[in-house]
Image (cartoon, grey):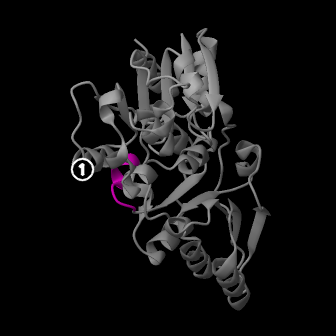
């Protein structure tokens, strides 16, 4: 089959793309909607429910009004995967779902929110397909509780880098926070730099952008600290678990439906306790991902959408 995939990030689609190519499908990728690719393909996969699917599904889009460009194709399999960022900004309310065959969610709480706000036509099938993690890409190593804490993410409000610093400030000074992120600037950078200096914290900014091999970067870390107030999954958590690193996860809404409640904290003092306790079970962290988020299961479910 000919598959057009529209995704400007490829963070969540790399394994799917590799799989479909290995299956013999011809896959072409663009960062945003390309009408020519939709006309070319048998299947159009829109990663994220955003401007691309809004425009492509809209019969009144100016592209379709141009007689030299052609009409909206109606004989394709159209798939849209909606992530939490799409759900919270309400993008689903601006899509013509009558053009879409499959609407995919990665978490129940996102699915429930979206379906309470839109009315779908019988044409649109709804699927819950949890993320699958390719644990083979990560080198597992039994670890002992040590003192290097990893924090991964963009410096957006919901990622709460400030909370991570407050937790570090409550720990003995031989603990270090290793930050791999992008987008720290303006008032947030001023605050972060000021807080680190005022509290004499051991903070290492390992990369101002993004490391090319997260597996290598994680190898000498002992904890993954997630302070996020919203997630549909948390890929950084899964990647750290795959290496054998203990996750320390803030109790974002529905976190206990996704992750082991033993790893979840509500307050700074609870996060501190999880870090300082002797309990450390590297194999259990990796097995949790293997058992709950197997890549093969996810790939099979997406294969079904092509039929």
Task: Between residue 240 and residue 209, name the one nearer to us.
Answer: 209
Q: Which residue is drawn at 59% across and 23% down?
A: 36
Label tally: 1
User: Which one is nearer the viewer's eye here, 272 or 44?
Assistant: 44
Which residues are drawn in magenta? 252-258
Foreground residue among 71 and 95? 71
Relative to 251, is 187 above or below? Answer: below
Q: In which quarter of the image is the C terminus?
A: top left
Is 255 magenta? The answer is yes
Is residue 38 rendered magenta in the image? no
Vertical placement of 218 versus 95: above or below? below
Residue 153 position in % (x across, y down): 61, 58
Residue drawn at the location 26% of the way across and 24% of the way down: 123
Examine the rendered structure and indicate whether residue 213 appears above or below residue 295: below
Residue designated by label 1: 117
Q: In which quarter of the image is residue 152?
A: bottom right
Q: What residue appears at the point 48 percent right and 39 percent down from the top-left corner? A: 62
Q: Residues within 10 Å of mark 1 (few under 14, many from 20)?
A: few
Q: Locate residue 27, reporting x and y percent.
A: 62, 19
* Quadrant occupied by the N terminus: top right
The single residue placed furthest to the front in the displayed view is: 67
Element class at badge 1: loop
| Residue 119 drawn at (x, y percent) | 21, 41
């Amino acid at each position: 089959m000919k598959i057009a995939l529209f995704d400007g990030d490829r963070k969540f689609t790399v394994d799917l793309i590799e799989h479909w190519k290995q299956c013999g499908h011809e896959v072409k990728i663009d960062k945003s909607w390309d009408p020519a690719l939709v006309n070319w393909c048998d299947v159009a996969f829109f990663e994220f429910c955003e401007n691309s699917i809004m425009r492509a599904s809209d019969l009144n889009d100016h592209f379709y009004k141009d007689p030299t460009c052609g009409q909206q194709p109606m004989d394709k399999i159209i798939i849209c995967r909606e992530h939490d960022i799409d759900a919270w900004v309400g993008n689903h309310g601006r899509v013509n779902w009558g053009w879409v065959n499959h609407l995919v969610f990665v978490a129940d709480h996102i699915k429930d929110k979206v379906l309470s706000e839109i009315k779908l036509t019988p044409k649109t099938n709804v699927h819950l397909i949890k993320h699958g993690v390719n644990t083979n890409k990560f080198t597992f190593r039994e670890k002992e509780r040590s003192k290097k804490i990893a924090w991964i993410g963009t410096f957006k409000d919901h990622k709460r880098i400030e909370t991570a610093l407050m937790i570090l400030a409550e720990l003995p000074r031989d603990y270090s926070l290793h930050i791999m992120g992008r987008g720290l600037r303006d008032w947030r950078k001023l605050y972060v730099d000021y807080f680190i200096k005022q509290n004499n914290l051991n903070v290492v900014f390992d990369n101002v952008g993004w490391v090319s091999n997260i597996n290598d970067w994680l190898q000498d870390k002992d904890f993954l600290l997630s302070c996020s107030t919203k997630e549909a999954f948390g890929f950084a958590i899964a990647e750290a678990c795959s290496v054998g690193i203990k996750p320390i996860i803030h109790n974002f809404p529905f976190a206990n439906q996704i992750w082991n409640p033993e790893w979840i904290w509500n307050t700074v003092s609870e996060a501190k306790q999880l870090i300082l306790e002797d309990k450390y079970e590297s194999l259990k962290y990796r097995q949790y991902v293997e058992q709950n988020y197997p890549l093969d299961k996810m790939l099979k479910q997406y294969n079904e959408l092509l039929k």
